[in-house]
Amino acid sequence: MSKQHNENEANRKKEQLEQFTTDDRGKKLTTNQGLKVSEDEFSLKAGERGPTLMEDFHFREKMTHFDHERIPERVVHARGFAAHGEFEVYESMKPYTKAGFLQNPSQKTPVFVRFSTVAGSRGSGELARDARGFATKFYTEEGNYDLVGNNIPVFFIQDAMKFPDLVHALKPEPHNEMPQAASAHDTFWDFVANNQESAHMVMWAMSDRAIPRSFRMMEGFGVHTFRFINEEGKSHFVKFHWKPVLGTHSVVWDEAQKINGKDPDFHRRDLWESIENGDYPEYELGVQIVPEEDEFNFEFDILDPTKLWPEEDIPVKIIGKMTLNRNVDNVFAETEQVAFHPGHVVPGIDFTNDPLLQGRLFSYTDTQLIRLGGPNFHELPINRPVCPFHNNQRDGYGRQTINRGPVSYHKNSLAENTPATSTEKEGGYTHYHEKIDAHKVRARSESFKDHFSQATLFWNSMSAAEKEHIMNAFSFELGKVKNKSVQKQVVDMFANVSHELATIFADAIGVTPPAERKNSVTKSSPALSQENTVKSPKTRKLAVIIGQQFDGIEVTSVLNALTKDGVQAEIISDKLGTVHGSNGTELEVDHTFLTADSVLFDAVYAVGGSNEDKAFYKKAALFIYEAYSHYKPIGATAEGIKLLQIEGMENDPGVIYGGDSISFPSKFIEAIAAHRFWGREVV
Ligand code: HDE
């Protein structure tokens, strides 16, 4: 296949959307009926100071449209942001699946990805402690395939029946609608303590995974076990993973809370700006594959969505790459109106009996009916497949297709029995012929009853710093819980995961520590620790704290070296305008201490300036101290050392002092890539 052909394929969705895109710039203002408007500021009145007239159709149309501009937000995952991109497979997956988009390495499939938080409403801060949605729509030649995942590989509950209860407990409490976008309240923890299958996901939610640095730096997981089906009809169990090329990184909790105030759009801004700058976010698609005959060879049930498959036991095979390379034109039309559904599958991908997945297969279409106002949401431009679609469905709110002819039923003779069904060979979807012979029961399978082993596996896999963050998160969250009995129940529950963990947070919240409990799980999975992730300086945001009469030669050479490695420097001073270096170098100031904040950057380069007063030094020192207390890399050169507030700070890990200016840039880049330096004693 030629390169041109691939590009055409990748652009198919873009071209389709363009048919619906309109640019109002330079055009004449009209009503929705196309009537040219002569006056758009004043309503039609009986006299200049008189009442407005009913006759004013222009006013009524404009106001009515405005009055109806809002649609219900998603009941969960309301706050989200999305981008377009493309996916390509590295090698044919033919032995495992017949899915067309996974066959040919030279084929590109358009995708649309929406990232989200779960609990908060549409306007909430993005740095909530929460799971993140990671939903991908592949516009394949065989129809849309949606991989509707999260950045945490397991879920709170095992059966969809409990989802409304979970969400009621997690959302703001109904009597006073507080707290927004937070799990730190009584009803959530009451739910946890009384639904102990949540233990494993709660461990993830209390870990750094729940406060990602960026959508570009988090993993994605399909969570459920799905099936791959090949041409011969053979089934393999499969779990899906997205691995971010930049690695998996997080912020610290104090920082997250401050970012929510300083820039509640922090994550969407990061995604938007990266794409605008051409730093396209990339994720590799990985699969863990288990042959059908091995279904019962594990110490957990592979259908249980509170269990992950340790990567050391079942390796993740990397099979392709997704690149996000285009921002949306209109957030409402695309991001808000996109409708994902785990039931949007293509031949070669099938479901398992995971009771959480089975329930999701009902919920997603159901929710779109109320959210998008009727059964024609598949016709919204963002939701249309790029392949043809024909059936006998007709009419309903907002119908756009004009179906010709009298026949809208199957079977028929008047239209030669078309639209016609397809055989499996012709690409018709057939469900996997799984044999089922069972009693109808409302019950949890015995094999789903171990709630703690993998929660402990997760705990065992954490580094010392990660464990400390988890203990602090429990202490914070339960510190916000008012009900003593709930606090106690949670302490008792998590003593089953780790006695050490439960004892530490029990102490922090004034609850009697639990009695010593034996925990036989010693296994760990290094792949779960973010300490072992990819480290790269690329796209890291550097705050350059600089004043008048800085050392021009040094700063120019350091910034050149850093930007060559992909670091993005922004100049911060106490006034906008230009700062002047000693040798005539000039730099344009991007932000002042008022408009920028330490929490919005990954690292700080303390330069200072020989011509600055005490006020400048005070603001600069505070900025740097905050970065230091969030364990961020700090580089300081001769003049900049004066900005380091604490004595001996220059000897701390991740503080690079530029005494030796030759090796300074490379040491600083290495520190920026390292992300954070947990070894610092911070009070
Ligand atoms: Fe969802 N979920 N979910 N969910 N979910 C929705 O569908 C639901 C679950 C996920 O960016 C809703 O269109 C049930 C697991 C994402 O548009 C709703 C259950 C996972 C998104 C719904 C789950 C997810 C949603 C709300 C338990 C990870 C946002 C709006 C059985 C694998 C998609 C909507 C987007 C959205 C139901 C559990 C991921 C109500 C009943 C597990 C990423 O249909």
Image (cartoon, rainbow, N blue to C red):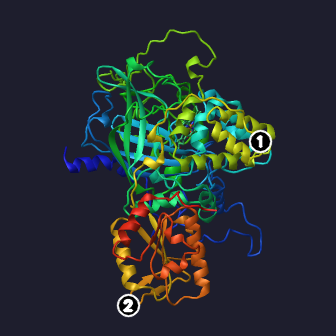
In the image, what residue type sits under mark 1?
Answer: Val
Q: Is residue 393 left or right of residue 76?
A: left
In the image, what residue type sits under mark 2?
Answer: Asn
Which image quarter holds the C terminus? bottom right
Q: Please, what secondary structure does the residue beneath circle 2 have?
A: loop
Query: Residue 599, how many percent across, how many down?
Result: 56, 65
492 or 263: nearer the eye? 492
Q: Which mark is residue 511?
A: 1
Q: Which residue is mark 2?
A: 583
User: Residue visible at 71% across and 60% down?
Assistant: 54
User: Residue visible at 39% across and 65% down?
Assistant: 669
Compared with residue 158, is residue 401 higher up or lower down, i.e. above or below? below
Q: Is residue 257 left or right of residue 548?
A: right
Task: State whether residue 116 appears in this view.
Answer: no
Query: Residue 122, how many percent across, how many down?
Result: 62, 52
Mark 2 vs ligand 1: CB under 8 Å? no
As measured in the structure, the alpha-carbon distance from the residue carrying label 1 to the one carrying label 2 is: 63 Å
